[in-house]
Amino acid sequence: MKTEAKISRVSARVTPSVYNTLTEASEISGATINQFLVQAALEKAYTIIEHENKIKLNRQSADHLFQIIENPPKKNPKLAKAIRTYKQDM
């Protein structure tokens, strides 16, 4: 059974000077204008998504986080039990 991939269309209206620039860049890169546009848009999309998914801490929060990492609190009974249970299940 042959599986058909769904393809969606994206289009944009641009001025002739923008079109000429995009065409020139796509030709230089050896791609069709559609391939060039999709690749450029994907690169930008990945950059935006990666930036948005980063954990953002202010200086005070970052200092607090590093302090906890360097000097972790003592294990309470619930945490000690959870660690034992985890190690037994491994």
Image (spheres, rainbow, N blue to C red):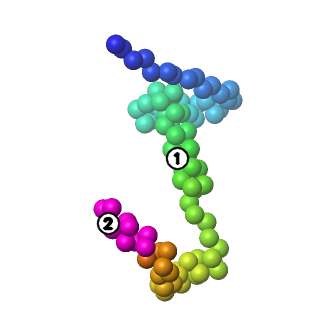
Q: Residue at the spot x=57%, y=55% of the render?
A: 53
Marked residue nearer the N-terminal end (1 or 2): 1
Q: Which residue, given by chain and number where applicable, does mark 1 sit on?
A: 46
Report if residue 72 is visible in the image: no
Q: Residue at x 49, y 74 (%)?
A: 78
Q: Is residue 1 left or right of residue 79?
A: left
Q: Residue furthest top?
A: 1
Instruction: Where is residue 20? Give x, y as percent.
Output: 59, 30
Observer-nearest of 34 and 56: 56
Q: Is residue 61 above or below residue 50?
A: below
Choose top left, top right, bottom left or bottom right for residue 60: bottom right
- 36 sits left or right of 51 in the view: left
> In the rendered structure, which amino acid carries the disc numbered 1?
Tyr
Q: Give the magenta part as a residue range.
A: 81-90
Instruction: Reply yes or no: does residue 25 show up in magenta.
Output: no
Q: Nearer the viewer, mark 1 or mark 2?
A: 2
- Closer to us: 66 or 29: 66
Pick the quarter of the image with the N terminus: top left
| Mark 2, residue position | 88
Dominant SS in magenta = helix
Residue ID at (58%, 35%):
21
